[in-house]
Amino acid sequence: MQLRVPNQRLEPTRWKGVKIRPVRPELHRTGIGLKLVVAAEDRLRSEGVEYLPVKTLSASAGDKPYLGTLAFCTALDFRVLEEMPSLWDADNPAVLLIKRL
């Protein structure tokens, strides 16, 4: 798979995705999620990775927990690269976010 950033085509060696896993609600706003993402980013940078993409449920789905995930990612400087309404299915529209490391 090739990831497309406007005006660029990124070879797979320049990007690596991670799976976002939820932090238990009672641990929200404690910094654990940030620590996990920072550790992943540090490791990826050490491997020469330039971009970190993340796929999750789109805001258009209106799902409250996933709206929190999107807010968390946005706060960490991830930006929406592409809405993908049919990647999974009509009830679960996806969004691809990306961050330059």
Image (cartoon, grey):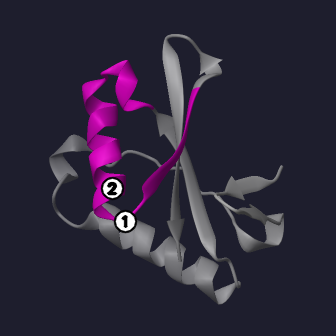
Q: What residue type is disc 2 on? A: Thr
Q: Could you say which disc has been placed on residue 77 in the image?
A: 1
Lateral position of residue 61 relative to residue 95, left or right: left
Q: Which residue shows up at 25% across the image and 27% down it? A: 64
Secondary structure of residue under mark 1: loop
Secondary structure of residue under mark 2: helix
Give the CA distance from mark 2 to mark 1: 5 Å
Q: Is residue 41 above or below residue 31?
A: below
Magenta stretch?
58-84
Q: Which residue shows up at 32% across the image and 49% down it? A: 23
- The question of residue 76 being in magenta is answered with yes
Q: What residue type is disc 1 on? A: Asp
Lateral position of residue 20 relative to residue 52, left or right: left
x and y, in percent, of residue 21 in the image: 45, 47
Answer few, some or many: residues within 10 Å of disc 2's Cα (few below 14, many 20 plus, some between 14 and 19).
some
Lateral position of residue 10 relative to residue 33, left or right: right
Q: Which residue shows up at 23% across the image and 67% down it? A: 31
Lateral position of residue 7 relative to residue 37, left or right: right
Q: Could you say which disc has been placed on residue 74 in the image?
A: 2
Which residue extends farthest top?
A: 90
Q: Which residue shows up at 43% across the image and 67% down it? A: 37
35 and 72: which is toward the camera? 72
Q: Are marks 2 and 1 in contact (CB under 8 Å)?
A: yes
Q: Is residue 62 above or below residue 65?
A: above
x and y, in percent, of residue 91 in the image: 49, 11
- The image quarter containing residue 30 is bottom left
x and y, in percent, of residue 52 in the image: 58, 64
Which residue extends farthest front?
A: 7
Answer few, some or many: residues within 10 Å of disc 1's Cα (few below 14, many 20 plus, some between 14 and 19).
some
